[in-house]
Image (tube, helix red, strand yellow):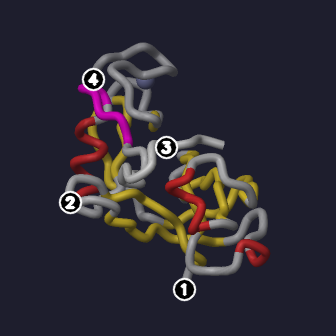
Amino acid sequence: MTTRPAGSPLTRPLPSVDEDTKLFWDFCKRHELRVQKCTKCGNFHYPPSAFCPHCSNITSEWVKLSGEGKVYSFVIVRREYHPAFESQLPYVVAIIETSEGVRMLSNVVGCKPEEVKIDMPVEVTWDDITPEFSLPKFKPAS
Ligand SMILES: [Zn+2]
């Protein structure tokens, strides 16, 4: 368990941004789920990177995803790993496979953790955690 000095604000960790990830987070801020698609081999690659992990090509386009997918794998977190998330316990950390085949680490929200199942259809929803950051999360598909 992490301890913090008395009286210090309880702040959640934020995504780290670098030149490879900046565009991804800028799109998220606009509630657009976009990932890189290699202009040479056509494969999606995520997380963002300067080159394609499939063919090492350095050019890509940012393609908007449908926002639909399914739960590929998940865990229910029941203990505190960071004090900023204690109030959210229990919560679901999941690997979502989008309908385009991209696997993303995220959360499933909008239902009880016990209701989450493998292959459950989900759709993106946005968690505006700060004015600068919106996190793509997934809820049961309507
Ligand atoms: Zn490629």
Label 3 or label 2, whichever comes before in sequence order: 3
Front of the two marks 2 and 1: 2
Name the residue that disc number 1 marks. 142
Name the residue that disc number 2 marks. 131
Residue 92 appears in which quarter of the rendering?
bottom right
Find the distance from the CA under tag 1 to the CA under tag 3: 40 Å
Label 1 or label 4, whichever comes before in sequence order: 4
Q: Residue at x 28, y 27 (%)?
A: 18
Front of the two marks 3 and 2: 3
Q: Residues within 10 Å of mark 2 (few under 14, many from 20)?
A: few
Which residue is at the far bottom? 142
Q: Is mark 4 within 8 Å of ligand 1?
A: no
**Residues marked 1 and 3 touching at CB (< 8 Å):** no
Instruction: Please name the amino acid that badge 1 sits on.
Output: Ser
Find the distance from the CA under tag 2 to the CA under tag 1: 27 Å
**Residues marked 4 and 2 touching at CB (< 8 Å):** no
Name the residue that disc number 4 marks. 59
Q: Residue at x 54, y 86 (%)?
A: 142
